[in-house]
Image (cartoon, helix red, strand yellow):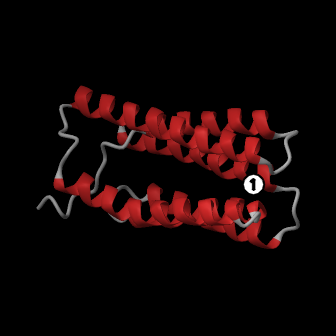
Amino acid sequence: MERAEPVTVISGWGIAAAGGVGFVATAATLQTPLTTRWVATWVAAAVVAFAVSLGATLRKATRSGTPFLTGATQRLALAFAPAMFIAAVLTGMLLRQGLGQFLTPLWLLSYGAAVIAAGMFSVRVIPVMGACFVLLGTIAAIVPSGFETWLMAAGFGGVHAVCGVLIARRCGG
């Protein structure tokens, strides 16, 4: 029975707050070219956004009396992890080769794939959110250089904010 139930303990407000972190990273990198500082800012933003979202999810689980570490949430995490691990490995490789211009499509596409995979165990909005990231990653792969920060803002800021609010309203926080 547990396999049939979607994971609804994910905090929409936490995802929306992750979008806020994305907007802060955008403001911090808007005038910064693709340098180590740009990469470090976005990596730090990803860590902060993950911590904020996880913290809000744990708080939602505690408030609702829903256990957080269930088989369903473990499957969700296991579905999410491989694409993120691949993105981390390829990020290091691209940076060592001086190919930082490929980070934006890599990050958007990998995150989108991870969210779609994890969304198979959650509410319907989650895989739609992942598809939005895949679309933005595809755009990032074909547009000329110079739009990296704007595409990161659209995904990690805008998509998170909009989908987070939708999840919060539909799933009680």
Quadrant where the image shows the C terminus: top left
Q: Position of residue 19 (x, y in %)?
A: 60, 39
Q: Is residue 135 left or right of residue 170?
A: right
Instruction: Report x, y in % for residue 76.
Output: 32, 58
Is 129 placed left or right of 124 in the picture?
A: right
Residue sitting at the far left: 1
The one of 164 and 113 positioned closer to us in this rendering: 113
**Kind of residue indicated by mark 1:** Leu
Q: Nearer the viewer, residue 6 or 50?
A: 50
The answer to whether residue 147 is visible is yes
The residue sitting at 88% across, 67% down in the picture is 144
| Position above or below: 83 against 63 | below
Quick one: label 1, few (<14), some, or many (20+) residues within 10 Å?
many
Give x and y (percent) for residue 30.
Answer: 83, 40
Residue bearing mark 1: 151
As helix, strand or loop, the secondary structure at mark 1 comes to helix
Quarter of the image where one finds residue 122: bottom left
- Residue at image location 38% in from the left, 31% down from the top: 55
